[in-house]
Amino acid sequence: MIVRSWLYVPGDRPERFEKAVAKGADALVLDLEDAVSLDRKVEARSLVADWVRNGDHGRAQVWVRVNQGAMGVDDTAAVALPGLTGICVPKVDDPSELTPIIKVLLSAEKEHGLVEGQWPVIPLIESAVGLTRLSSIVSAQRVVQLQVGEVDLAADLGLSGDVDLHLAPIRSRIVVESIAAGILSPIGPVSTEFRDLDAFRSSTQTVIGQGFVGRACIHPDQVTIVNEMFTPTSEQLSGAQDLLDRMNMAIREGSGVALDANGRMIDEASARSARRVLELGLAAR
């Protein structure tokens, strides 16, 4: 299901896990990477694994951002438990980096009697090298969506100032690669702006216009805005359903042409947009 808001929570702060659920995020990302100091990573892994297995998740999806390399493989082995939704993998420069994590997930699925492919993977693109290999990354096994780590990416590219402006071409490319590969549109990038919520709202509107679906958040106050802005209105929902009904009727009648309420031709791109609106409506329930 499409997710509107993804709230990052430090993996070594278990007292925040259920509080984060209460804030209404569609998905929690329990972070074992950047949010946890090196001397607390083993402890954080244990805390996250325990909460994945035993915590009250409410209606939220539960994702874990693991570390890079061998540590990330160990993280995955520890948290691949019933209750997990999927794994976020940081700083992916090549699809081969996902292979050992996918092997661990497959083994854990068999161990727990779960269907193969139960746990999807979301790579984070955070470097120029990762950008050059987007086509192969989006096509990798279990990849369902991308996120861009813009702080690291901007640093790697030597960018500063208005990231909404300077990273716009890169954002567009990530959207295009995702759609072309048939996976979900990418997750909107995090913003460090959680005090000036008007600025955050404006930034989120830009992200929506650029084709992202949902947005990653680092503060609970951001979640409220993201949920609001990605929730379709009743008029949008009824319009989307009407468009799909018209398209389905044309197919049943054997017509090669379907028209919307304004007499414009409906194509598969229009139908895809309508399905996305309805899926966002489901996320809001």
Image (tube, helix red, strand yellow):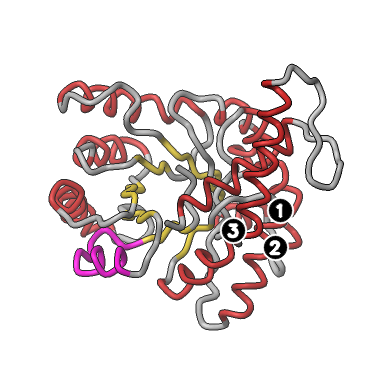
Sequence-first disc among 3 and 1: 1
Vertical side of 52 occupied by 235: above or below: below
Indicate the position of residue 87 as horizontal and vertical percent values: 36, 40
Indicate the position of residue 169 as horizontal and vertical percent values: 76, 49
Q: Secondary structure at mark 1?
A: loop
Q: What stretch of residues is rendered in magenta?
A: 9-22
Kindly identify the amino acid type of the residue bearing the numbered disc 2. Answer: Thr
User: Label 3: which residue?
Assistant: 232
Q: Is 112 one of the magenta-colored residues?
A: no
Q: Quadrant of the N terminus?
A: top left
- Whether tag 3 and tag 1 are in contact, CB under 8 A, the answer is no
Question: Toward which corner of the image does residue 55 lie, by quadrant?
Answer: bottom left
User: Label 2: which residue?
Assistant: 206
Q: Quadrant of the C terminus?
A: bottom left
Question: Toward which corner of the image does residue 31 lie, by quadrant?
Answer: bottom left
The CA distance from mark 3 to mark 1 is: 17 Å
